[in-house]
Amino acid sequence: MDSVMPAPAAEAKPALPILDIQHVTKRFAFGAETIMALSDANLRIEKGEFLCLIGPSGCGKSTLLRMVGGFETPSEGTLLMWGKHVAAPGPDRGMVFQDYGLFPWLTVTQNVGFGPAARGRPKAEVAATAKRFVDMVGLTRFADAFPHQLSGGMKQRVAIARVLANDAEVVLMDEPFGALDAFTRERLQEELLEIWARTKLTVLFVTHAIEEAIILADRVVVMSPGPGRIVADERIDLPRPRDPTSPEFNALRRHLSALLGGHH
């Protein structure tokens, strides 16, 4: 009796990336003049990746972040999240800014619970969600404080907790630690990495600082001066926590610095 050969297994379809940026260009009109902020950007980001964008001022980093957030639309190209067009802001993408963006009339807990409350979640669920994320960012003692009673680092923790409480899958961070002193910045970098490791979030983080990018990222994307183009996409394979004094770290710093310097 002839043996029956098993049918070949169907080829598995490649999993969709959480973000897929395809040939995205952005122009802004200023009176009769048109400024190209971003030119033909292509970027594929997998779920759970921590990606840093670095480049000089005016290179389109924040513009790209705002387009992923749904606050700007591309002039050309396609921007997809889980294969669907990004057309507007949504709770699945949360933005954290350098200036915090907190509501000054709300307490820490109320700021963190604002998103779920605005979406009509039951009060008990809002309270439990807010408490969970206030605790996660280490602000339990300050749960009833108002923003003016907090340090800059604490305000930034509240901003991060607010995004997390809103069920964000992607966190978009626009130089969130840029205004903080070096000690606070280092602490928050460590805390952000701990939160990222626990939550498996996807993070897109804009920074001017090469060292910060190497400390944080799985990948560092280097952009040229305006009109911004992506000139390199470097995978950072150093084990965490990363030591800025190590030869490997400094070799990467020199490499990324050369990439930036080559496009002035």
Image (spheres, rainbow, N blue to C red):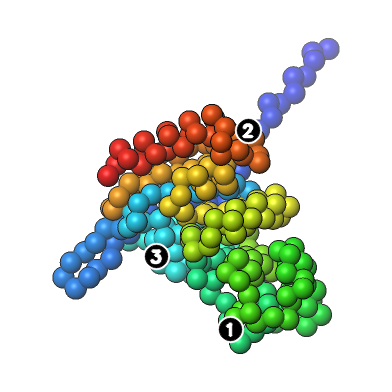
Residue drawn at x 29%, y 42% as measured from the top left: 263
Distance Cα–Cα, label 2 vs label 3: 35 Å
Between residue 20 and residue 231, name the one nearer to us.
231
Residue 87 percent location from the top left of the image = 47, 66
Q: Nearer the viewer, mark 2 or mark 3?
A: 3
Amino acid type of disc 3? Thr
Between residue 42 and residue 173, name the one nearer to us.
173
Residue drawn at x 53%, y 62% as measured from the top left: 180
Residue of label 2:
11
Amino acid type of disc 1? Pro
Could you tell whether 228 is left or right of 67 in the image?
A: left
In the picture, the quarter occupied by the N terminus is top right
Q: Secondary structure at mark 2?
A: loop
Residue of label 3:
73
Q: How many marks?
A: 3
Could you tell whether 31 is left or right of 129 in the image?
A: left
Residue drawn at x 61%, y 71% as measured from the top left: 151
In the picture, the quarter occupied by the C terminus is top left
Residue drawn at x 19%, y 73% as measured from the top left: 31
- Residue furthest to the right in view is 1
Marks 1 and 2, the one that precedes in the sequence? 2
Could you tell whether 122 is left or right of 38 in the image?
A: right
Q: Nearer the viewer, mark 1 or mark 2?
A: 1
- Residue furthest to the top in view is 1
Vertical position of residue 196 compared to residue 156: above or below: above
Asked whether residue 41 is in view, the answer is no
Residue 189 percent location from the top left of the image = 61, 53
Residue 18 percent location from the top left of the image = 57, 51
Vertical position of residue 112 compared to residue 84: above or below: below
Residue of label 1:
104
